[in-house]
Image (cartoon, rainbow, N blue to C red):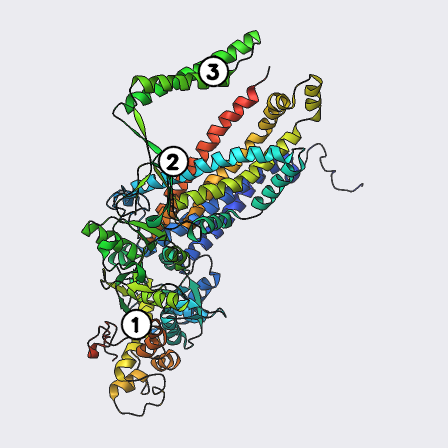
Amino acid sequence: MSTGSPAPDRSRVPLWRDIRVLRVGGQAIALLLVFLLLRWLLGNLTSNLDRLNIGFDFGFLTRPTQFKIPYHSTFDDRSPVWQMVVVGIKNTFLAGFFGILLALTLGLVVGVSRLSKNWLVARLATVYVEFFRNIPPLLIIIFFAAALFTYGPFPNLREAILIDAPGTSSTLLILSNDQWGIPGFTGGERWALFAALLGAGLILAITAWLWRTRVNENTGRPHHRVAWFFGVLVGIGIVGYLVLGGPFTISWPGQSENRRLIVGGFALNWGFMSVAAALGLYTASHVGEIIRGSILAVPRGQTEASTALALSGFQRYRFVVLPQALRIAIPPIINQCLNLVKNTSLGTAVAYAEITALTQTSIGNGRPALQSLLVMMAVYLMFSLAISLLLNIVNRRLQLVTR
Amino acid sequence: MKAIKLLAVLTALMLVLAACETGGGDDDTTTTAGAEEPTGEETTTTAGAEEPTTTAGAEEPAGDGLLETVQARGSLLCGVNDVLPGFGVVGDDGSFSGFDVDLCKAVAAGVLGDPEAVEYVPLVADARFTALQSGEIDVLIRNTTWTATRDGQEGATFLFTTFYDGQAMMVPASTGFTELEDLADANICVLSGTTTELNLTAVFGARGIAFNPQVFADNEQLRPAYESGQCEAWTSDASQLAALKATIEAEGGEEQFIMAEVISKEPLGPAVRDGDSVWAQAVEWSIMTTVQAWEFGLDSTNIGSYAGEDPNILNFIGTDGFDPGLGLAPDFAVTIIESVGNYQEIYERNIVPIGLQIEGSPNDLWTNGGLMYVPPYR
């Protein structure tokens, strides 16, 4: 150890081993690398575009689309491209919304069923989860479209199966391999007034909900807030309907003279049904697993304590286990919802006119690829951020419930 | 103090690295093949360094030397269709065949001297121009219609029209539909991103007929929808419909009817990237050679043994060393015709089997009243 040279200063760590320097240096290097990568990509892009003499602007959004969109007879091919984007957003939203609705309800049922003491129920749920979870969603969509529509049991629209509502001569359902017709409603002349009334009713119902919650918190009496909420809403709806003399009528689906169109009611097209149902079923298997895991994650002591308090099985779930389980489940469920919305892009395989399919068609018809893709990315980003925001609000509310 | 010094050294090091990297990046961008083809860059530079004075070099203002790149690479990247009988299909053994595929072979034979030196890149309609722009392919020969927008906005240069087509409408024969008006409000199957989709919209719109498009990405997805009756009609180029009609009927499907009315003009031809006229000329002449040989009465059997004295033909087969300066071998025409045949042979091998005759069609030679007319080879 003893040498002629001066002993190294042991009170200070050398720079290349100083944790602070290493941290800062690491961050700086990472940042620089990311910056260089972006610069390289952007440089590639601009120089390639320049070389090919292709401009980079978004003027195409205001020029005519030049093609028609499936199942949008009102969409004119002279409409600008941005309107096509709006239709794409609408279709993506519809498939995503109904898919999420199906996924969450079915997922909750499946998740709870997997923990059921009933052997058959638990096994069925397991089979369901293992089946859907292990197949790529694209295959499920294509299978749905093929099994139900393309090679399915229904004739084409001109020879569609009409099912009458029992006891009437109105058509309840129109089934074909192309579109299904279901009953809808059409607003009369006082429809706007009625809608406004319903809006007011909703506000009133929410107020009732909050009031009952407060009563429950202050006095400990049962709140019955769900009953109150719907009681107020439905009550106002019925009164409004009677007072305004029928502001809307049920419209039954029917066929046009050449039997090629569905008039009245709502028309569901096969692409939409395949995408929404397939993605709903697929995502439900994941949601089910999340719910099951979250329920299992609630400490056993909670269940035992609630049993000791003589709560019934339902009460145990409703008031002790599920509130805690949901708190754990919400973040991964947000992920599943985001995935579902992004998976709607697979709808292009079954000719469903969502944003990806329309963008592809648009690019194929001469719109600039890069700008179109950027618009599409912005749309998906908007969807994802909106869902995250919504569910994060839910999450925050659940987390804050502490008494 | 020490910490600052080290940071400074680190930063300096990174800057040097950065300079190297951005320099490399800029080099990359000048190659046509892009990031996926690192060899492309090297070959371009070496080819340029070794042959600074090619004949082509003088008349090459902004070209990036794709001809040299392809010749150095030794294979041609050809964008084709893989699901269209007659034009481009993949066989059971994975080999490509069809009219467009034979033209790829002709280009490879002309440019590289080997008709098999082709890498086929199957493309869906939507992706073809992106693939061309990005350098994924050297030439696009995929039943592609020449339009002004594609010439202008897609950065493509269209070359000699190899097939004159027109859009038609196919329905199952049992429906008895014979004219477009029978299809009011009907679902009509069409491929997305094709000129047929725009024509369909424009023609039906002009006549005030409402319809509902069913848009698919390729024929494999479209056909089941058509055969199950999800769409009542299928619109595409007449040649495609003829091929599909033959396939459907041969496979035991329903009898099909193609409406007589042709609703558009569809000149199909090869396309290359804008900005490299040397490459464009090499491709164009490789393909036009097949028509010229037909006009001369030369085919794959007799071009190698030509013993006549016609000076035009002697120029054409390059026996007396005639070189028009296209950057191709003097006898490239012989290589092409011997390996893939002349236009008529290519047509009869691929298009006649799907039920379209050459006689009386626009694809006949100009001397027979058709539109196949190429500039003189001299």
Q: Position of residue A372 (x, y in %)?
A: 35, 46
Quarter containing the C terminus of chain A = top right
Amino acid at circle 3: Trp
Residue B318: x %, y % from top left: 32, 84
* Number of numbered discs: 3
Measure the alpha-carbon separation of dots 1 and 3: 74 Å
Gap in Å between the C-alphas at discs 3 and 2?
Answer: 32 Å
From what the image shows, is residue A258 above or below residue B271?
Answer: above
Q: In the image, what residue occupies the spot 45% across and 19% down?
A: A230
Given the image, what chain letter belongs to the residue carrying mark 2?
Answer: A
> Can you name the residue that lies furthest to the right here?
A2
**Chain letter belonging to callout 1:** B
Cα distance in 3D space between marks 1 and 2: 53 Å
Please report, as a chain letter, where disc 3 is located: A
Circle on res. B340:
none
Q: Are marks 1 and 2 in one subunit?
A: no
Q: Quick check: marks 1 and 3 in contact, CB under 8 Å?
A: no
Camera-side mark, 1 or 2: 2
Q: Which mark, residue A228?
A: 3
Secondary structure type for disc 2 = loop
Do badges 1 and 3 share one subunit? no
Q: Which residue lies at the image location 49% right of the left edge and 25% below the top edge?
A: A393
Q: For the residue carrying disc 1, how many other residues have a C-alpha within 10 Å: few (<14), some (14-19), or many (20+)?
A: some
